[in-house]
Image (spheres, grey):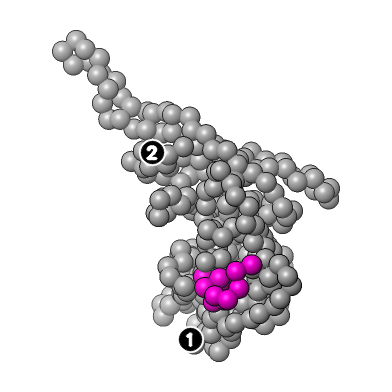
Amino acid sequence: MNVIQRPEAQSFCATMRDYIIDTDSTIKFAVSYGGGLILEEEYTPDKNFKVHIRKLGKFCENALWGVWCAGETSYQNDAAGTFTFLINDVVDMQCFVMFSRLATKKEAAAPGWLSEAREKVTRPNAFEYISGVFETGQKAIVTVRTFDNAVSSADLYTHAGSKGVVTVDVSPGVIFAKFPNLDNIASYSIIKSSDAYKFFVDKSDYIDFFVFRFKNVYDMPETLCTVGLMTVKPANTSENAYMYGVERVFAIKPNDEYTVNSGVFFLPTDYKLWHNMMNTQEAQIYFDGTWYPIVISKPNYERELRRGVIKNVEFTFRMADPDHNNIIDL
């Protein structure tokens, strides 16, 4: 028996390499995670004496998930982990696997920040989160730049635990509080090793302003703000029946549809974030101090590839819990 190809030591679920094993007999293949076996199967070689174990990363994905950020930092203990692969009851390798819902161009050995963007526009009253794989003792530093080009830096986070994924709250309010003597911050960058994520601060006043958060392709929380118009189309799926000859409405089930426009766009890279949000499994809207789960039903936007044309994004959503249809005031 000879292993011709195996996964890399650090991999994303969607891009993990297949196992290819050269053997002339049936083999037993197993996967261990979290202290127990989660897979144990037998494979018979094909006519070329090869065993192909495909989509192993997608199997590992079933054991991984991300969580919303709570507080200034959140440890994403279930977004990545070490899987042990065994062949005929002998350990062949261990692989640190990171969640990814779709294929990514990132290098798994050095993933940097777990986001499809490297810069975005934020607003002073927005929420922002950033996630990455941290080694023991590794730091995240914030560097701010003012409108008069003054630069200042401060430590943001130092990782004290074992290797893992961490989400850090980098909202403008959190960052501004670290520099109380600077009131004209134009941008700030979050730096980990050689990886930087830059936020440009838009301090314009908008009549309509909503914040949405979603779990991106790595199941990490990110946010987007809309400054365009939001409209609602009331609807319900209530049941009608007659009682004593009078038609009545029973089991009222509001199913309102909200349509929101992104408003002004500044960066073409925003399309990557919008694409992630349109294809997310979990999204929420922030209203009156509370996050409410929503279901995005009708994304509507176009991107002209390789052309410098930026168009607004529009999408339709409904409240995931019908009881929340009375929450948002327009």
The dot on residue 161 is 1
- Give me the residue at 52% from left, 55% from top: 213
Which picture quadrant has residue 229? top right
* Residue 197 point in image, percent of width and height: 67, 70
Q: CA distance from mark 1 to mark 2?
A: 42 Å
- Residue range in magenta is 174-184
- Return the residue found at the far right: 307
Judge left or right: residue 149 versus residue 233: right
Give the mark toward the camera: 1 or 2.
2
Percent from the top left, x then y, of residue 118? 69, 66
Asked whether the residues under the numbered discs 1 and 2 touch, taking CB atoms below 8 Å apart as contact, a structural biologist would say: no
Task: Pick out the residue farthest to the left.
Answer: 244
1 sits left or right of 149 in the view: left
Q: In the figure, is residue 236 to the left or right of 215?
A: left
Quadrant of image for the N terminus: bottom right
Residue matched to label 2: 325
Decide: few, some or many residues near mark 1? Use Cα within 10 Å; few <14, some 14-19, many ≥20.
Answer: few
Farthest residue toward the bottom?
Answer: 137
Inspect this view and state whether residue 86 appears: no
- Mark seen at residue 212: none
Residue 291 image offset from top left, x and y in percent: 42, 54
Nearer to me, 107 or 268? 268
Tag 2 or tag 1, which sits nearer the N-term?
1
